[in-house]
Image: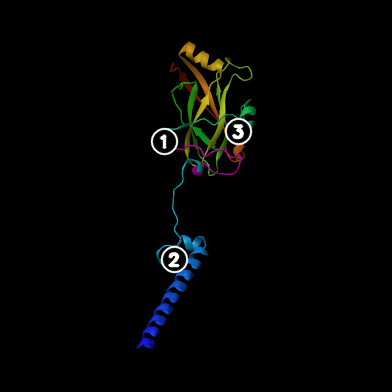
Amino acid sequence: MAAMGGGRRLVGLGALMVVLALSGCGSSSKSGCGNSCANAGSGGAVRTTNKGCAANCANAGLPGAPAPSSSGSGAVAELGCHQYCQSAGGYGGGGGPSPPPAAKILNQGTVSVLPGGVVPVTVQCAISSPCRGAILIDFGTACTSPGEGGRSDLDVSPQSTRTIGVPLSSCQLALVRRRGSVKVVITADTGASGVCKQYDCVVPAEVTLRSSA
Protein backbone atom coordinates (compact mmCIF):
# COMPACT_ATOMS: atom_id res chain seq x y z
CA MET A 1 0.00 0.00 0.00
CA ALA A 2 2.89 2.39 0.88
CA ALA A 3 4.56 1.72 -2.49
CA MET A 4 1.28 2.31 -4.23
CA GLY A 5 0.88 5.62 -2.41
CA GLY A 6 4.43 6.60 -3.36
CA GLY A 7 3.59 5.76 -6.94
CA ARG A 8 0.69 8.13 -6.82
CA ARG A 9 2.98 10.88 -5.54
CA LEU A 10 5.45 10.27 -8.37
CA VAL A 11 2.68 10.37 -10.96
CA GLY A 12 1.42 13.67 -9.52
CA LEU A 13 4.92 15.17 -9.59
CA GLY A 14 5.40 14.08 -13.21
CA ALA A 15 2.14 15.71 -14.26
CA LEU A 16 3.16 18.93 -12.53
CA MET A 17 6.48 18.99 -14.44
CA VAL A 18 4.65 18.48 -17.74
CA VAL A 19 2.34 21.43 -16.96
CA LEU A 20 5.32 23.66 -16.08
CA ALA A 21 7.12 22.64 -19.27
CA LEU A 22 4.08 23.48 -21.40
CA SER A 23 3.73 26.85 -19.66
CA GLY A 24 7.36 27.65 -20.37
CA CYS A 25 6.94 26.71 -24.02
CA GLY A 26 3.97 29.02 -24.44
CA SER A 27 5.87 31.88 -22.78
CA SER A 28 8.91 31.33 -24.98
CA SER A 29 6.78 31.21 -28.13
CA LYS A 30 5.07 34.49 -27.24
CA SER A 31 8.33 36.32 -26.62
CA GLY A 32 9.61 35.28 -30.05
CA CYS A 33 6.44 36.40 -31.88
CA GLY A 34 7.11 38.89 -34.70
CA ASN A 35 4.90 41.75 -35.90
CA SER A 36 2.71 39.53 -38.05
CA CYS A 37 2.15 37.17 -35.16
CA ALA A 38 1.44 39.97 -32.70
CA ASN A 39 -1.08 41.54 -35.06
CA ALA A 40 -2.72 38.29 -36.01
CA GLY A 41 -6.44 37.93 -35.40
CA SER A 42 -8.88 35.20 -36.19
CA GLY A 43 -7.69 33.12 -39.11
CA GLY A 44 -4.15 34.54 -38.78
CA ALA A 45 -4.92 37.69 -40.85
CA VAL A 46 -2.88 40.81 -40.11
CA ARG A 47 -5.01 43.60 -38.70
CA THR A 48 -4.93 46.88 -40.68
CA THR A 49 -6.69 50.22 -40.18
CA ASN A 50 -7.91 52.30 -43.12
CA LYS A 51 -7.70 55.95 -42.04
CA GLY A 52 -8.77 57.38 -45.39
CA CYS A 53 -6.96 60.20 -47.22
CA ALA A 54 -6.88 63.56 -45.45
CA ALA A 55 -5.91 66.96 -46.86
CA ASN A 56 -2.13 66.47 -46.83
CA CYS A 57 -2.52 63.06 -48.45
CA ALA A 58 -4.80 64.44 -51.16
CA ASN A 59 -2.27 67.16 -52.01
CA ALA A 60 0.70 64.79 -52.10
CA GLY A 61 2.86 64.78 -55.21
CA LEU A 62 6.36 65.33 -56.45
CA PRO A 63 8.51 67.68 -54.35
CA GLY A 64 7.89 71.25 -55.42
CA ALA A 65 4.79 70.37 -57.44
CA PRO A 66 1.78 72.66 -57.00
CA ALA A 67 -1.20 71.35 -55.11
CA PRO A 68 -4.03 70.02 -57.23
CA SER A 69 -6.27 72.78 -58.38
CA SER A 70 -9.81 73.25 -57.18
CA SER A 71 -12.43 72.15 -59.69
CA GLY A 72 -15.54 72.59 -57.59
CA SER A 73 -18.57 74.27 -59.05
CA GLY A 74 -18.37 78.03 -58.67
CA ALA A 75 -14.81 77.98 -57.31
CA VAL A 76 -12.44 80.74 -58.43
CA ALA A 77 -8.83 79.56 -58.72
CA GLU A 78 -6.03 82.11 -58.29
CA LEU A 79 -2.95 80.67 -60.02
CA GLY A 80 -0.46 83.54 -59.91
CA CYS A 81 1.59 84.70 -62.89
CA HIS A 82 4.75 82.77 -63.74
CA GLN A 83 7.27 82.75 -66.60
CA TYR A 84 5.01 82.37 -69.64
CA CYS A 85 2.36 84.64 -68.16
CA GLN A 86 4.87 87.41 -67.44
CA SER A 87 6.12 87.48 -71.04
CA ALA A 88 2.75 87.09 -72.80
CA GLY A 89 1.27 89.95 -74.83
CA GLY A 90 1.94 92.09 -77.90
CA TYR A 91 -0.58 90.29 -80.11
CA GLY A 92 -1.05 91.34 -83.72
CA GLY A 93 -3.64 90.47 -86.33
CA GLY A 94 -2.92 87.58 -88.65
CA GLY A 95 -3.98 87.07 -92.23
CA GLY A 96 -6.04 84.27 -93.69
CA PRO A 97 -8.69 82.08 -92.11
CA SER A 98 -8.29 81.30 -88.44
CA PRO A 99 -8.18 77.71 -87.18
CA PRO A 100 -10.63 76.69 -84.43
CA PRO A 101 -9.84 78.17 -81.01
CA ALA A 102 -8.09 76.01 -78.43
CA ALA A 103 -10.09 77.71 -75.67
CA LYS A 104 -13.10 79.97 -75.26
CA ILE A 105 -13.80 82.78 -72.79
CA LEU A 106 -17.35 82.29 -71.57
CA ASN A 107 -17.72 85.69 -69.86
CA GLN A 108 -20.15 87.98 -71.65
CA GLY A 109 -21.65 91.40 -71.02
CA THR A 110 -20.84 92.76 -67.55
CA VAL A 111 -18.46 91.07 -65.11
CA SER A 112 -18.32 92.15 -61.47
CA VAL A 113 -14.90 92.59 -59.93
CA LEU A 114 -14.61 90.48 -56.80
CA PRO A 115 -13.47 91.96 -53.45
CA GLY A 116 -9.73 92.42 -53.52
CA GLY A 117 -9.70 93.44 -57.19
CA VAL A 118 -9.95 89.97 -58.77
CA VAL A 119 -11.83 89.35 -62.04
CA PRO A 120 -13.40 85.88 -62.40
CA VAL A 121 -12.64 84.70 -65.94
CA THR A 122 -14.32 81.47 -67.03
CA VAL A 123 -12.37 79.56 -69.68
CA GLN A 124 -13.49 76.47 -71.58
CA CYS A 125 -10.73 74.20 -72.91
CA ALA A 126 -11.86 72.79 -76.26
CA ILE A 127 -8.92 70.45 -76.98
CA SER A 128 -7.91 66.96 -75.81
CA SER A 129 -4.82 68.20 -73.96
CA PRO A 130 -4.56 70.74 -71.12
CA CYS A 131 -4.99 74.41 -72.07
CA ARG A 132 -2.03 76.26 -70.59
CA GLY A 133 -0.77 79.80 -71.00
CA ALA A 134 -1.92 83.17 -69.71
CA ILE A 135 -4.98 85.39 -69.25
CA LEU A 136 -4.53 89.11 -69.83
CA ILE A 137 -6.87 92.05 -69.17
CA ASP A 138 -6.32 95.07 -71.43
CA PHE A 139 -7.70 98.52 -70.56
CA GLY A 140 -6.81 100.00 -73.93
CA THR A 141 -4.90 103.30 -73.66
CA ALA A 142 -5.19 103.38 -69.87
CA CYS A 143 -2.79 101.56 -67.54
CA THR A 144 -0.29 100.66 -70.28
CA SER A 145 2.97 100.98 -68.36
CA PRO A 146 4.88 97.77 -67.50
CA GLY A 147 3.27 96.00 -64.57
CA GLU A 148 -0.04 97.88 -64.95
CA GLY A 149 -1.88 95.07 -66.76
CA GLY A 150 -3.92 92.41 -65.02
CA ARG A 151 -2.71 88.92 -65.83
CA SER A 152 -2.71 85.34 -64.56
CA ASP A 153 -1.56 81.87 -65.48
CA LEU A 154 -4.06 79.84 -67.50
CA ASP A 155 -4.40 76.13 -66.72
CA VAL A 156 -7.57 74.24 -67.64
CA SER A 157 -8.01 70.47 -67.95
CA PRO A 158 -8.90 69.00 -71.39
CA GLN A 159 -12.51 69.36 -72.47
CA SER A 160 -13.46 71.14 -69.24
CA THR A 161 -14.32 74.58 -67.87
CA ARG A 162 -12.61 76.51 -65.08
CA THR A 163 -13.02 79.94 -63.50
CA ILE A 164 -9.69 81.65 -62.84
CA GLY A 165 -9.30 84.79 -60.76
CA VAL A 166 -7.23 87.44 -62.53
CA PRO A 167 -6.00 90.20 -60.21
CA LEU A 168 -6.20 93.73 -61.58
CA SER A 169 -3.22 96.01 -61.21
CA SER A 170 -3.51 98.94 -58.80
CA CYS A 171 -3.94 101.29 -61.79
CA GLN A 172 -6.77 99.19 -63.27
CA LEU A 173 -8.56 98.70 -59.97
CA ALA A 174 -8.43 102.41 -59.19
CA LEU A 175 -9.84 103.19 -62.65
CA VAL A 176 -12.74 100.74 -62.26
CA ARG A 177 -13.59 102.08 -58.81
CA ARG A 178 -13.42 105.67 -59.99
CA ARG A 179 -15.57 105.16 -63.09
CA GLY A 180 -17.82 102.41 -61.77
CA SER A 181 -17.50 100.40 -65.00
CA VAL A 182 -14.88 100.07 -67.74
CA LYS A 183 -14.91 98.27 -71.09
CA VAL A 184 -11.92 95.92 -71.43
CA VAL A 185 -10.56 93.11 -73.56
CA ILE A 186 -9.80 89.78 -71.89
CA THR A 187 -7.40 87.55 -73.81
CA ALA A 188 -6.94 83.82 -73.30
CA ASP A 189 -3.47 82.88 -74.57
CA THR A 190 -2.99 79.09 -74.72
CA GLY A 191 0.42 79.27 -76.38
CA ALA A 192 2.01 77.07 -73.72
CA SER A 193 -0.22 74.16 -74.77
CA GLY A 194 1.89 73.31 -77.81
CA VAL A 195 -1.07 73.09 -80.22
CA CYS A 196 -0.89 76.47 -81.96
CA LYS A 197 -0.28 74.93 -85.39
CA GLN A 198 -3.67 73.25 -85.31
CA TYR A 199 -5.64 75.75 -83.20
CA ASP A 200 -5.97 79.48 -82.63
CA CYS A 201 -4.11 80.03 -79.37
CA VAL A 202 -5.07 83.70 -78.82
CA VAL A 203 -8.76 84.31 -78.14
CA PRO A 204 -10.08 87.75 -77.06
CA ALA A 205 -13.41 88.70 -75.50
CA GLU A 206 -14.82 92.19 -74.88
CA VAL A 207 -16.63 92.69 -71.58
CA THR A 208 -17.46 95.48 -69.16
CA LEU A 209 -15.92 95.32 -65.70
CA ARG A 210 -18.13 96.66 -62.94
CA SER A 211 -16.87 97.79 -59.57
CA SER A 212 -18.17 95.91 -56.53
CA ALA A 213 -16.78 98.49 -54.07
Q: Position of residue 102 (x, y in %)?
A: 54, 37
| Residue 80 to residue 17: above or below | above
| Residue 58 to residue 169: above or below | below
Front disc: 1 or 2: 2
Q: Which mark is residue 73?
A: 1
Q: Which residues are magenta?
A: 57-73
Specify the amino acid type for callout 3.
Answer: Gly
| Residue 193 to residue 2: above or below | above
Front disc: 3 or 2: 2
Q: Which mark is residue 188?
A: none
Q: Is the residue under label 1 in contact with that under label 3 (CB below 8 Å)?
A: no
Q: Quadrant of the C terminus?
A: top left
Q: Residues within 10 Å of mark 3 (few under 14, many from 20)?
A: few
Q: For residue 83, say whether it is visible.
A: yes
Q: Secondary structure at mark 3?
A: loop
Give the Cα separation between the discs numbered 1 and 2: 47 Å
Specify the amino acid type for callout 2.
Answer: Gly
Q: Position of residue 62 (x, y in %)?
A: 59, 44
Give the Cα separation between the discs numbered 3 and 1: 38 Å
Q: Secondary structure at mark 2?
A: helix
The residue where tag 3 is placed is 96
38 or 205: nearer the viewer: 38
Outermost residue to the top: 178
Q: In screen coordinates, is 74 left or right of 199? A: left
Q: Position of residue 139 (x, y in %)?
A: 55, 18
Q: Earlier along the polypeptide chain: callout 3 or callout 1?
A: 1
The residue where tag 2 is placed is 44
Q: Residues within 10 Å of mark 2 (few under 14, many from 20)?
A: few
56 or 148: nearer the viewer: 56
